[in-house]
Image (spheres, rainbow, N blue to C red):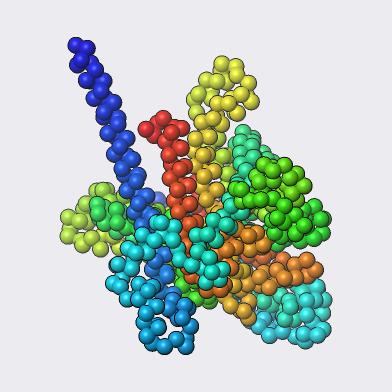
Amino acid sequence: MATSQAVQGGDGRFDALLRLARAAGRFVAMVTVTLAGLLAVTFLIGRVVPIDPVLAVVGDRAPPHVYERVRQELGLDLPFLQQFLIYCRKALSGDFGTSVLTTNPVMTDIARVFPATVELSTVGVLIGILTGIPLGVLAAVKRGSVVDQFVRVLGLVGYSVPIFWLGLMGLLLFYARLDLVSGPGRLDITYDYLVTPVTGMILVDSIMQGQWEVFRNAFSHIILPAAMLGYFSLAYISRMTRSFMLSELAQEYVTTARVKGLSEARIIWRHALRNAAVPLVTVVALSYAHLLEGSVLTETVFAWPGLGQYITHSLQNADMNAVLGGTLIIGTVFVFLNLFSDLIYRLLDPRTR
Amino acid sequence: MAETSLSNPAGLRAWLLSAEPGSRLQARLGRAYLGWRAFARNPLAMLGLAVVLLLVLVALLAPLLETHPPLSGGDLRTERLLPPSTAGHWLGTDDQARDIFSRIVAGARITLGVVLLVSIIAMPVGLLVGTVAGYFGGLVDTALMRLTDIFLAFPRLVLALAFVAALGPGIENAVIAIAITAWPPYARIARAETLTIRNSDFIAAVRLQGASPMRIIANHIVPLCMSSVIVRVTLDMAGIILTAAGLGFLGLGAQPPLPEWGAMIATGRHYVIDQWWVAAFPGLAIFVVSLGFNLLGDGLRDVLDPKAAK
């Protein structure tokens, strides 16, 4: 009796485990295929480039036997598929080749510039969350009111305005005319090298080392580009918050809560928003991923030494290894952010299990 | 009888709204008329339509509207970087002493051309991939959708950047690069629509009559996917304009002397502190036009695809 129950219990658990394993397997397979696809795309782009990689190394006056030797060293005489496999193996071990421009391995360069981009997008997305969610909630609660119209206009403008232009106009107004913020770059030159990079994010490093002057200066530099990026995630987050909240507020449990005599504030912020928060996690993760993209243009305008500026700078100098390495990194981060938001969604919402 | 009543507007409306249309054409026109009435009730959508029509008009009439030649400048010693509304230059002049208003007008052609070309390339590709994947299902579906996901996994601008890097800068290559990044969402939508249609009775009936899969897809499935794909394309046009402008701004899209709006901002960038108008007006043009496409797309969605409207 007892054993059979135990076996049954074990069976149930085993089934659940099996289901989980199968879901995990499908997940892993999907990610693997997508990553392989990313590699294939960057590999193919690298092959169709009109720049001869051998000539880039030896110069156009090299004798034929040198040319041929370098061609073999670079593995360009191997069959196409084999070249691709070698490319994959190298990329998976973090080897994207050497940057012609900086003569460093591309991975070293990216590791140096990536923290700046992460810092900028994180501050941006924080601004987007802190303003977008309250605005979206208010717009949903007071549907059709001035606040609702305001949020709608904010969203429309955010979807329509070119981010690099907004950045330039922001610099003109807040830096040149009003002198409220600091100009392009991450720090004023007098504050350079005062903080030893640990995380590479100046805001974090300066707090850790108690350098408040540096922190203040870094903050005055980051606030304008981050506010620009934050505005774009605000446009997206507030719009989605509004629509999630509208569908939550129409649910019957809200009526029940009202009948029970709960205060309206409690219903909105504790009950409805908590349920709307589940899909919002996905929205936040997605907008974070999009800020990585927006940072390409924003970093150019604000001379922000991050991944976006690295890619565009390499592009203008025909440094293909750097461009493709950077593209691959952004694509991978994109894939994993999507994956992460999916997992969180499953974790937070029991109905999806 | 119909002929006589068509001459006055009331008769035309009655003919369009007839509950028993006499021909396929009458039924189609009637539906289009109903859609238009719903669309015209939305003032923001009408505003969007007006902006888009204005863009088309400006692009068509560009040579007539230009007050100065857009590609060649005036006297570099006296007419450089003039502020707005001096000496017949409504929006001022740029660093090459070229009239900014004329350049914006000429740039309307480029913007409209890019939007049209990208849609013409990307829409059929997306429709084909999506409907074929949805109709055949199984392995074809998995393979095509994986391919779509791979393209969706890249941020759009970054992928376009990489393609332009491979193809070389220029407006034609920018169009190709943007089109390559634009089709996946259309394929997704077409597939979703196809999945809801493919098991309907009328498809089964056509199949029993011996129609080939290609005929079923082209004649019976694609027309039903069109409306949601068109809505998505219209909503995407603002994004296409912004991506093209972004590429131009980075110096990878239209090359100088072409008066592309993004490239104009890139030149204005060097003078933004003291001569703000060089960068400000082209950006304003981009903003107004993409806002117009966004409003138009929102309005079209409400009419053509009420399910998606929230």
Can you see residue B23?
A: no
Q: What residue do we see at 80% from left, 52% from top?
A: A180
Residue drawn where x is 71% and y is 60% of the image: A184
Q: Is residue B146 left or right of residue B42?
A: left
Q: Quadrant of the N terminus of chain B?
A: bottom left
B182 versus A281 height, above or below? below
Which residue shows up at 58% across the image and 57% down it? A113
In the rendered image, residue A40, in percent from the top left (x then y), is placed at 37, 63
Please determine whether, in this image, residue B282 is positioned above or below residue B131. below
Relative depth, front residue between A180 and B303: A180
On screen, B177 above or below B295?
A: below
Report the residue that reaches farthest toward the top: A1
Q: Quadrant of residue A246?
A: top right
Evaluate whether residue B129 shows in this view.
yes
Residue at the spot 77% in from the left edge and 85% down from the top edge = B76
Q: Nearer the viewer, residue B62 or A167?
A: A167
The total of numbered circles placed on residues is: 0
Most foreground residue, A203 or A65: A65
Q: Quadrant of residue B153?
A: bottom left
**The one of B300 and A197 positioned closer to us in this rendering:** A197
Counting from the top left corner in percent of width and height, residue B167 is at 46, 74
- Counting from the top left corner in percent of width and height, residue A59 is at 48, 83
Residue A189, image x, y percentages: 75, 59
Is residue A322 shown above or below A213?
A: below
